Image: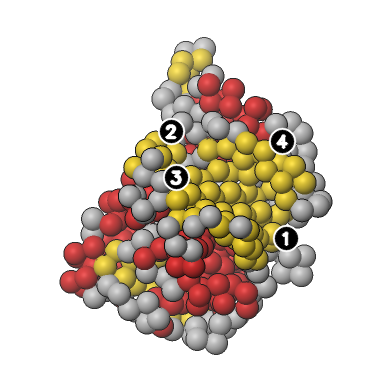
Amino acid sequence: MRIAVLGAGKMGQGAGFDLVRSPQVEEVLLVDRERGRARGLADWLKSPKVKPVLADVQSSAGMVELLQGCDAALSCLPYRFNLTVAKCAIQARTNLCDLGGNIDVVKDELALTAEAKKAGVTIIPDCGLAPGMVSILVALGMKRLSDVSEVHIRVGGLPQNPRPPLNYMLSFSVSGLINEYTEPCLLLRDGKPAQIPPLTEVEEIDFPPPWGRLEAFQTSGGTSTLPFTYQGRVRELDYKTIRYPGHCQAIKPLLDLGLMGSEPVLVNGQEVIPRKLLETLLLSYLPTTGPDVVLLRVSLQGEGKKLTYEMVDLYDPQTGLSAMMRTTAFSASIVVQMLGSGRISQKGVLPQELSIPPEDFFQELEKRGIGVEERWDS
């Protein structure tokens, strides 16, 4: 297979690491608009399979030409680029998945399904951790448990050594983090899709030592297309982000005061975008490296039984890959390889819960040292 990875950031690094180790993959194109970043990642991977490519996704003609020679592509770009990339993939007749993160962009991608079918390609948005892996877990649970009435998804990436006052590290982009904290949260209430504000409905959640008691609260993006897929079948479905206790109380005033806003304000005669200022400050204060942990729990209730999936994944000191890179990028790498090999043959733009074979996916994940525990409670 010949696979293109668009974006040579942290998640592109994790995906590239996994792809070059796959015997099915013959060549990996590392595509970025910054030559130094693509070349730097290629040097880090140290594989003859890797070819760094300088390209800009906003140059559609060049992107189409680049994708035409690939069996599949993975977009690790910010979600605002994914609709353009999807259109280029259809023109190039190349299968595609992306890391997603915004339901409005995903809806626009889903609207391209007729064009994708006509071109004979498959496009699957939102294929990271959350959104991504959690949707495939829900699909697996829905197969194993009948008459599911409630689905609760809880996921968080945390530093193993937290530092006050936020007790957080930037394990992915600061822009993506603020999107999660500002955009409406899509869920199911009484069987119908609904939206509620982020940074609300704080609850306590416990994980085995050394993590102990934590908190979880509403953030956007994690449910992806699940509320539309399961409306009328499931009464309650929601997604909350896990953090150390007190994080939501510390961060929410920044939202309430407008510091996450995108509209410019005048400061001493100069226009300042509050969000850009906050992003700059968070980047300068919060750590971006160091040992982290990803905690996941997906619970399904039905038939008087409760089915729970739980995962704890840690930073890998041997490879230098963070837990967030492993769980997000390895998940996407599995999907893009399924697309490139033809394991997913259905055509069109498809939600992951309706297109990715869950048993195969989690077998592949376990091969990469990421285990998900299944637990039944009556």
- SS at mark 3 in the image: strand
Residue type at the position of mark 1: Tyr
Nearer the observer, 31 or 134? 134
Q: Are marks 4 and 2 in contact (CB under 8 Å)?
A: no
Residue type at the position of mark 2: Ile
* Mark number, residue 315: 1
| Residue 176 visible to the viewer | no
**Residue that carries the numbered disc 2 in the rendered image:** 196
As displayed, is residue 255 above or below residue 44? Answer: above
Q: How far apart are the two marked residues, 2 and 3, measured between alpha carbons?
A: 13 Å
Nearer the observer, 46 or 15? 15
- SS at mark 2 in the image: strand
**Residue that carries the numbered disc 4 in the rendered image:** 245
Closer mark to the observer between disc 4 and disc 3? 3
Q: How far apart are the two marked residues, 4 and 2, measured between alpha carbons?
A: 22 Å
> In the rendering, at what x and y percent does residue 130 appear?
52, 54
Q: How far apart are the two marked residues, 1 and 2, measured between alpha carbons?
A: 33 Å
Closer mark to the observer between disc 2 and disc 3? 3
Residue drawn at x 54%, y 31% as measured from the top left: 200
Give whichever of discs 4 and 3 has the lower sequence position. 3
Circle 4 Cα neighbour tier, 10 Å, few/some/many (<14 / 14–19 / ≥20): some
Residue type at the position of mark 3: Glu
Q: In what quadrant of the picture does the N terminus appear? A: bottom left
